Image (cartoon, helix red, strand yellow):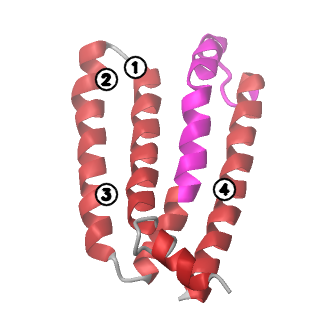
Amino acid sequence: DSLSGEFSKTLGGLSAGAGALLAAMAAVSTLFPGALASDPSLWPIMVTFRPYMMLSLLCGALSIAGDGVLTALGDIEYLWRCQAANVAVLAVWLFWGVPRFGRGILGVWEGVCVFMVMRLLTNAVRLFRPNGILGSKAAATQQP
């Protein structure tokens, strides 16, 4: 119904704001690496994964909001299947790809970033499908 759609939009907006704030805080924190790690040899590494960390935090906040909406709608089976697939992709990357390609901590952040983007996309596909709570059919029924 329109109330659920409005709530979902509001939750999405708040989550986007929270994610953007967290991403900005992550960016700023890597400008002062001494506050996070006392070993100066780690500081250049921290700067290399900054974009992955920022995108992960932004997508993570939005995907958690999507998880909440889909859970409230009782779409648990879809969530379970998607998240199981997302975790499987992440596990393959972390346990095979990172060591195989020598990616180290940067590879871990690359994997986390891909995981969060996949979570966001799988939720968006479900929420914005034509008959989804934020889809075209829902939008058409909400117009005055």
Contact between marks 2 and 1 (CB within 8 A): the answer is yes
Mark 3: which secondary structure?
A: helix
Q: Is label 4 in a helix, a strand or a loop?
A: helix
Tell me the magenta residue range. Answer: 35-62
Q: In the image, what residue type sits under mark 1?
A: Gly
Residue 34 in the image, given as x and y percentages of width and height: 74, 23
Residue 35 located left or right of residue 3: right
Q: Where is residue 62 in the image (x, y as percent from the top left)?
A: 56, 57
Q: Which of the marked residues, 1 or 3, is nearer the chain's N terminus?
A: 3
Instruction: Identify the residue shown where x is 68% and y is 22%.
Output: 38
Q: Is 14 on the left or on the right of 46, as rendered? A: right
Going from the N terminus, do you reach mark 4 or mark 3 first?
4
Badge 3 amino acid = Gln
Frontmost residue, 2 versus 81: 2
2 or 1: tag closer to the N-terminus:
2
Residue 92: quarter of image: top left
Label 2, label 1: how far apart the Cα atoms are: 6 Å
Query: Which residue is identified by label 3?
Result: 83
Mark 2 to mark 3 CA distance (whole Å): 21 Å
The vertical placement of 86 against 81, above or below, is: above
Mark 2 or mark 4, earlier in chain: 4
> Amino acid under label 2?
Val
Write down the residue under mark 4.
16
x 42%, y 61%: residue:
123
On screen, residue 116 above or below 48: below
Q: Which of marks 2 and 3 is in front?
A: 3
According to the picture, the residue beneath numbered tag 1 turns out to be 104
